[in-house]
Each structure stands twice: as structure tokens, then as C-alpha cells.
Image (cartoon, grey):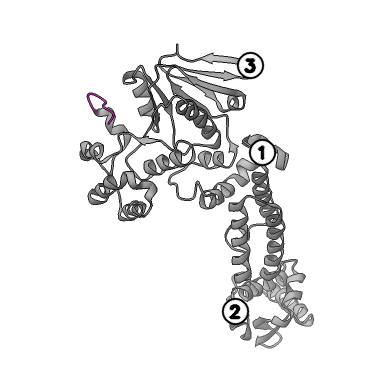
Amino acid sequence: MDYRRQILSDLLDKYEKSTQTEFKRRIMLDCTKLSYLDITDPEQKRRFLEAVTELSEKELVDYDWERKGYVVKRVWLNTDRADEAFAFIGRKSAHSATNELIALFKEYSERIHTLWITEYLSKQISVMSERSKPVDKWQNDTALVKDILKALDEVDKLIGSISMRAFSIRLYDDSKYFENNIKKYIADIAAKNEPELKDMDELSEREILAQIGIIMMPETFEFCGDMTIGFSEGKVDFSPIRSGSCITSDCVKDIRYITLDRHISRLLFIENKTNYSEYCLNSKRFDELVIYHGGFYSPAHGVFFKLIADAARSNNIPVYFWADIDYGGFRMFVRLKKNIIPTLRPLNMNSYAYSSHSEKLLVRNDKYIQRMLELLTDTDYEIFYDVIYKIAQNKGTVEQECFLLDENLVLV
């Protein structure tokens, strides 16, 4: 063991944990209690004394004796020479490391234009400046921090979507490096800061990353009904496929138009996959186009949804949305309505539908109910005010699957 390095490392750890007031007191070690020093071993005592003596001669530490010339009792740091002590063991002080990180964050912040990313970086800079030390994930090694910032920088530059493997190769020359080392950090940052994501619950990493343009694999868009899609290489009529059709997200860029057959009188977005499949097989009306919405729709899904909504709007066709009668369902309705379909209407999400299935409530805790009640302050949710009061009163929500137990699936 290099006792010089161990002694300084222990003292500097104490030094960095101390407050400014405590710096006025000695930062010391009780050498009679060190786990790595056996005072009954003459060789260890000799080597330890040599290390202490050398550090003392360099004026990095001072010490006193248990038995003069034989056993060292205490060693304390010369705090005026702390920078030299850090340099001696090749370690950066927290203050120095923080300044380097702040400079690095500022460098990226100045060239990134995506608002939620720059606001996040600015917040990190402020926190580190205030505390004079790295915080949270930035306590890791500098190379990892740089790779995280590189990923945020690349997200800022993305136009459209890119596969995770391609994203990783582009940045790190390794198709799996992002997934294995960086993905969890970017997903966590995006989930807490990207405006569309930060108030959503229970999103998977896949959904989070898709929102910022990184997809694990091509997405599948599912729909059922009489619709024709015009692609750059020709048109496809999906009406003969009665149980449901799909295309992948790779196709979206080639879509030139979407037309709905003249007899289509209603569009219905269904959030839950089980309900979508069951409805298409057993309950779909001849004059409906049904679209699988899924959970938190990605930008690519948003483009596809808009193309369909534009086709409906040109023919004055009403559009409905059906999801769980809960916080997430309300949030998804409002997001789709605000961003894509201003005339969107909820289906099976009112107080009547709730009361009809009140014996199958999913019990919610007080924290959840409080967050639900906060929606009452937002007029975007006014259409759900009545059912929100019922949810708060009963402390429970209704999942879409409950409707599958009905003998006749009636949409109201």
C-alpha cells in the first residue's frame, strides 16, 4: 500500500466534506484507529512513519506522537497547501472539477437551441455554482459526462427520427454504446424536462426516447377501416382488410395524401391495444375508421394522426378519443386535442360511463387524487370536471378493459 496516497486521500475526503467554518479546525486522522494500519506490525509502522515524514517534509501534513519516534498518533492536513496535496495524488479538488464542468456545460448550452435542454443545462450550472461541487449524475467521470452532453447536443440537431443504433454509431462509433451507457441518463433528463413528457406518468424509456426523436425500432401504426393512402410510389386501398391494417413509421415520409371513403362518418382513436383489437373484431361499425392511439404518441405518430385528421376535417367527419377514465387518459385526450385535432370529443370517458363501471374501480392513493384535482384549475379539462369530482369522491378510476366485460359494448 502507498501510505502517502492513502493518508492524503482520507484527509482530502474529510476536507471536501467539511463546511467553510470547519476548515478553521484541523482536518485530521486518528492513526491508532486506521483499518489499514496494524500498529503491532513493525514493518507497517516503519513504512507508515516514512510516509508521514515525507508528507510532513513537503509541508502537506503535520503530526504528533503516541510514542515519540515510534508510533504516530494523529496526522492533520495543512489546508493552506490543499491544492498541492490534490496534485500530489493526481486528484482534482471538488472546486476545480466543478469549474471544469461548469465551463463544459456553458460550452454546450451556448450552441444548443432546444429550449428545454438549455433550461436544464442552465439549472445544472446554477446548482453547481451555488454548491461549488458536482451534483447527481455529474459526479461521474468526465468522459461519461461529455458523452451525455454529446447526446443532448445531437438530440438538439435531430430533424425527424433516428434509430437508436444509428444514433449511437453517429456519436460514439459503437452501435450499442448509447443503449448500454447513456440511454438511462437521457431518458431521465427528458422525462423530467421535456414539456410534453414531464407531467406524464408511467412512460417507458422507449416512449420517452421516441418523443425526442430516438427510436429503438420502426414504430407500427395500426388502423381499421376504409381508407386509402397515397404514397410517393403509388396508392394503397386498405378497405378490403376488415380486421385491421398497419404501416411502419418508415412509410410516413412517403405519404402524399390520405383519403377516407365517402361512407365514413366517424373516426375513433382507441388508446388501449386490447380494446382496439377487440373493438375492431367484434364492435366496429361499417362507417367508422378506428385508429390505435397507444399511450404517449411519438412525433412520428403525431404526423400520421394529423394526416388522418386533415382527411376527416376536409369531410366534416367527427373525431372521438377513448381511453381510461383516469389522469393519463385525460392528459392524452387534451394533448391530442390541443396539438392535432381541435374538434376532438371524448368517448366513454364521462361521468355516466364512470358510474356504469364503478364496481370495478382501480383504487388510487391520496397523492394521485390530489394531482387529479389539480386538473380542475385548467380549463382544458373542463369537459372532464364532473367525472373528476366522482373520481375524487370514490378514490378510484376506471380502466378501458372494464368495458370489454359488457355484454354489448355500447359507446356513449
Q: Which mark is residue 32?
A: 2
Please tell me which of labels 3 and 2 falls first in the chain. 2
Amino acid type indicated by mark 3:
Glu
Q: 191 or 320, which lies in front? A: 320
Labels 1 & 3 near each other (Cβ < 8 A)? no
Disc 1 versus disc 3: nearer the observer: 3
The N terminus, quarter of image:
bottom right
Instruction: Write the residue at 34% across / 51% down.
Output: 372
**Horizontal placement of 274 versus 404: left or right?**
right
Residue 365 in picture, x, y percent from top left: 30, 52
Q: 353 or 177, which lies in front? A: 353
Amino acid type indicated by mark 1:
Phe
Disc 3 versus disc 2: nearer the observer: 3
Amino acid type indicated by mark 2:
Thr
Q: Which mark is residue 205?
A: none
Q: CA distance from mark 2 to mark 1?
A: 55 Å
Q: Secondary structure at mark 2?
A: helix
Residue 239 in picture, x, y percent from top left: 45, 14
Instruction: Write the residue at 71% across / 42% down.
Output: 171
Instruction: Write the residue at 72% across / 58% down.
Output: 107
**How many numbered discs?**
3
Q: Secondary structure at mark 3?
A: loop
Disc 2 versus disc 1: nearer the observer: 1
Q: What span is colored magenta in the figure? A: 406-412
Q: Secondary structure at mark 1?
A: helix
Please tell me which of labels 2 and 1 falls first in the chain. 2
Q: 374 or 127, which lies in front? A: 374
Q: CA distance from mark 3 to mark 2?
A: 82 Å
Determine whether 26 is above or below 382 in the image.
below
* Residue picked out by circle 1: 167
